Image: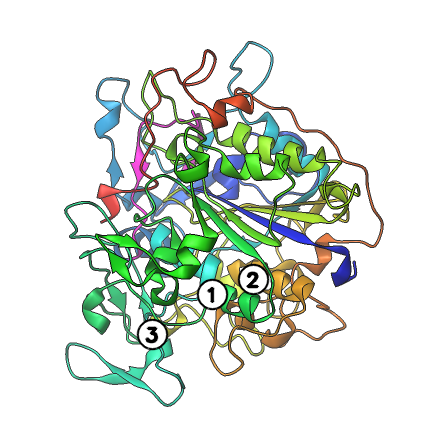
Amino acid sequence: MPATAVKHVVIVVQENRTPDNLFGADTALAQSGANLASSGMCHNAPVTLEPYELDACFDPNHQHAQGWEAMWDGGKLDGACDVRIAKESCIPVSPPPPYPNYTYVANTKYDGVHGILDPYFQIAGAYGFANYMFQTNQGPSFPAHQFLFGGTSAPDYFGDPKGQSCTDLQGNSYPCWQWFAAENPGGDSNGSAGCTATSVVDDIDPLGYEAAAYNKGLPCYTHNTLTTLLEQAGVTWRYYTSPHPYLLWTAPNAISSICDPVVGGQCTGTDWTQHVVLADTGSYAGDYAPVLTDISNCALQSVSWVTPDGTWSDHPGTGSPTQPSDGGPSWVSAIVNAIGTASTCDGGAGYWSDTVILITWDDWGGWFDHVSPAASAGGPGIGYSNQSATEYVYGFRVPLLVVSTYARQAYISGPSSGPSCATDHYYCHDFGSILGFVEYVAGLGSISPSYEYADFLAPDSTSSGCSHTVCPFPLADFFTSTKSPFTSISPGKYQPKCFHNPNQPGCWPNFVPEDPDNDADDD
C-alpha cells in the first residue's frame, strides 16, 4: 500500500481489555488462528476463564505497582488472582465469580438473536486482528494515553535528552528520557489530570522505584508529541474527547505546548482551542458524538484520535441499571460504518477509499492474558527487557483491529503459536506502531531522531532494527495493494443516534456523561 493512498488515519481508543478477555467468546476467530486462551494459572493452580458481562460490576486494579507487577509475577503470568478487585458496585447486583480477573466477556444476546459483541467479532472477522499488540507501558490509562498520543510518558527532556540528567529523591541522577509516568494521577480534589490540575503522578525511575519525584510528580510535560511533526508538515489533526477534558483520558491536557496558558483552570492554548474537540460543547452542544458529525459533514481531519464517553468505552465497573456501560461495540461500529458509507466525501471518492481506522484498547485493565509481554522485548535495537524502570515496556497484550479498503481481509497478524519478536518483528506491534504508521502515510520523520520515543522503538519499525525489506513501514503486514469493498458492520445494541443524543428511547433515557476512567481504585 503506497503512503499516498491514505489521506486519513482515525485512531479509536477504547478501554481496559485484553484479547483473551474481550475476544475469548469468538470461537470462529480462534479457529482461524487467533491466539486466545480459555484458562490460566493462579500460581500452582489452573483456573478456567468464566464468561461475564461486558458491563461488569467489578473493576480489576491495573496500576503498575499493584496490578501489573502482581500479574506479571516475575514472568510466570500466574498472579492475576493476587490483583485487587473493586467490587463496590456489585453489592446491589450480584457477587462476582471467585476469580474475577480470569473472565472473558460473554456475547450475551441483547434481543434474543444478536450478541452484544457482534460488531467487534464482525470487524475482526472481516478485516485485520492482531495476535501480538502490546501496550507500550506497564500501567494504567494515563501513561497509556500519553504513549498513544506522544510516544512516551517521560515527563521532560529539556532539549538534548542524552545530555540532560534528572535527579530522584535520593539525589541519584539519570538521563531524563529514562523516567516515565507510571500511574494514574491522584491527589486532586476534582479528579483532574494534566496542566490544569494539582494532581500528582508517581514516576518510575531507572532503578524501578516509584515516587512523585521528577517534576514533583506534576503531570504537565514539555516533550514533543506526534502532533509536533504533524504541524511542522502542515498535516491537520483533531483529538475528540468527552465533556470532561481535564481527566486522564485526554492526553493533550498534559502537554504544556498544547494546553498552556491555563486560565481559570482551563487550557486556553492555540493548539488546544483549534484541535481538541469536546463533546456537548461549543458548536457541538447537545451532540455527544462530534466525530460522527464531522464524518457526515465530510470534515474529517488527516489524523484523528477518538476517545469515548465512559458509557461506551468498554471500561468495567461503571454501569448502572439505568445507564449500562455496554455501548462500546455499537460505538465502534457506528464509526466504522460512518466512514465506510461516507461516499460523497473527498471529492466524491468517499472516505472508504483513503481512510485507515486503527482500533485499540489503552491498557489490559487487570484482566488475565496468557501471552507474555517479554515476547516483544529484547530485539535488535529495541533495548528493553522488562527488568528495570528504563525497560518500562512492554505491557500486556491489548486488542488491535485494522480496518481499511487496503486491509487484508479476514487477516490475523502473527501465528497462533507465538512469534519471536526479536526476529519476527512484523508480527509484533505496540502503540509506537500506530505512531509510526501515521508518520509513514504522512511522510514524516521520527518524533525525535535522538530520543527513544515509542515510534522509534516499535518492534515493526525500521528504526528499531527491523530492515526496510522486512518492515517497510509499521503495521505493514496488515495491508495489501488491492482495494476491497466496504463490509457493513452490525450496529449492535445501540443505533448511531444514541451517541449523538443518548436521551432517547432505546438509548440511555437518563443519560449522564461518565467520567473517562477516573479509577479511584487505581489512584
Residue located beneath label 2 in the image: 435
Sooner in the amino-acid sequence: mark 3 or mark 2: 3
Q: Please name the amino acid that badge 1 sits on.
A: Gly
> Over which residues does the magenta segment extend?
47-64
Query: What residue occupies the far front of the structure in this picture?
Result: 283
**Percent of width and height locating residue 476:** 71, 60
Q: Residue at x 67, y 28 (%)?
A: 489
The image quarter in which residue 436 lies: bottom right
Q: Please name the amino acid that badge 3 sits on.
A: Asp
Q: Is residue 396 visible?
A: no
Neighbor class of circle 3 (other Cα within 10 Å; few <14, some 14-19, many 20+) is many
| Residue 271 or residue 177, whichever sits in front | 271
Sooner in the amino-acid sequence: mark 1 or mark 2: 1
Q: Is residue 59 magenta?
A: yes
Secondary-structure class at tag 3: loop
Sooner in the amino-acid sequence: mark 1 or mark 3: 1
The image quarter in which residue 387 lies: bottom left
Give the answer, above or below, for where 7 lies relative to 179: above
Q: Is residue 521 magenta?
A: no
Distance in Å between CA atoms under marks 1 and 2: 7 Å
Classify residue 237 as left or right of residue 521.
right
| Residue 400 or residue 405, whichever sits in front | 405
Neighbor class of circle 1 (other Cα within 10 Å; few <14, some 14-19, many 20+) is many
Residue located beneath label 1 in the image: 151
Q: Is residue 407 visible?
A: yes
Distance in Å between CA atoms under marks 1 and 3: 12 Å
Q: Residue at x 49, y 22 (%)?
A: 498
Give the answer, above or below, for where 383 lies relative to 308: below
Classify residue 350 as left or right of residue 17.
right
Q: Which mark is residue 156?
A: 3
| Residues marked 1 and 2 touching at CB (< 8 Å) | yes
